[in-house]
Amino acid sequence: LGSNSYIFSSLFFDFENTSSIQCNVINCFHSYSPIVHLFYHRPRIQSDPQLTYNAVERLIENGVKIFIGTYTSACRKALLEILEKQECYLIYPALYEGQEMHPNIFYAGEVTHQQIYPTLHYIMDNFGPKLHLIGNDYIYPRATNKEIKRYWKLLGGEIIGEDYVSFGHANFEEIFNKSILQQSDAIFSTLVGESLVPFYRTFKRLGLSATTLPIFSAT
């Protein structure tokens, strides 16, 4: 390939809207380069850092130079070394925790202060100072909640609970009961993926509502 040509691969979950995201990025590159080769391949990386690394390694062997996606911070961080070593690039479209700048990654998503601070002000002004943090147990929720706790303290708030669950966790009744018992004014969720459906189903089954226990989420 010439110096003005690129091969793309996407590394997404099978979300319905990923095709439009890819087209927008590709159209952007077309404005800079007359030649864009599409290696339209979407490996099922399942938010697994090792599966992500293995998929990227295979695609690089096939000549892919630019990747779009990965979604979780754990998968993004797993690629830093190989991207730099192979002079490849990742367009990372998801919101993330910040605290990272790498020359081989284009960060397109919001960082913590852009997505979280306005929401915390709204919660404090409209619901109260008691906040319960719930997230999956990986980099993004823990780093984000660290920033939330720092800023919430400055606002005069109180963290009444901080719970982390594995990917795909489905039993949230105990966590909701804890939030009710501690008289939480609101929940801030950094849950992702398969945990989301049982989380909200449990919320409804327990008879909770946006009035009794509002949930705010960055994801």
Image (cartoon, rainbow, N blue to C red):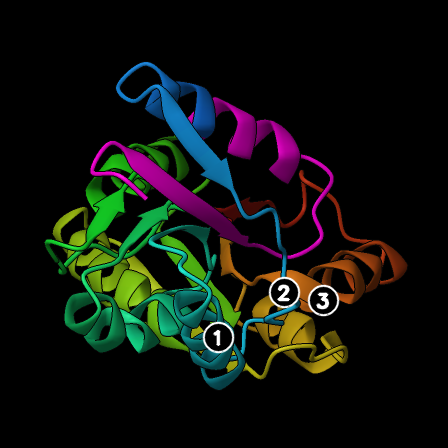
x%, y% of residue 146? 23, 68
Of discs 2 and 1, which sits in the foreground? 1
In whole angstroms, how far apart are the C-alphas of marks 3 and 1? 27 Å
**Can see residue 120?**
yes
- Where disc 3 sits, the SS reads helix
Residue at 24% x, 31% y: name it.
4
Of the two numbered discs 3 and 2 on the same chain, state the one appearing first in sequence.
2
- Mark number displayed over residue 194: 3
Question: Residue tagged by mark 2?
Answer: 43
Image quadrant containing the N terminus = top left
Q: Which residue is denoted by mark 1 in the rendering?
A: 58
Q: Nearer the viewer, residue 41 or 211?
A: 41
Write the residue at 30% across / 61% down: 144
Q: Which segment did they paint magenta?
A: 1-25
**Amino acid type for the residue under numbered disc 1:** Arg
- Tag in front: 3 or 2: 2
Q: What's the distance in space between the residues labelled 2 and 1, CA to CA? A: 11 Å
158 over 204 or under it: above or below: below
Q: How many neighbours does mark 2 have within 10 angstroms: few (below 14), some (14-19), or many (20 or more)?
A: some
Nearer the observer, 181 or 209: 209
- Identified by mark 2, the residue type is Pro
Mark closer to the chain start, 2 or 1: 2
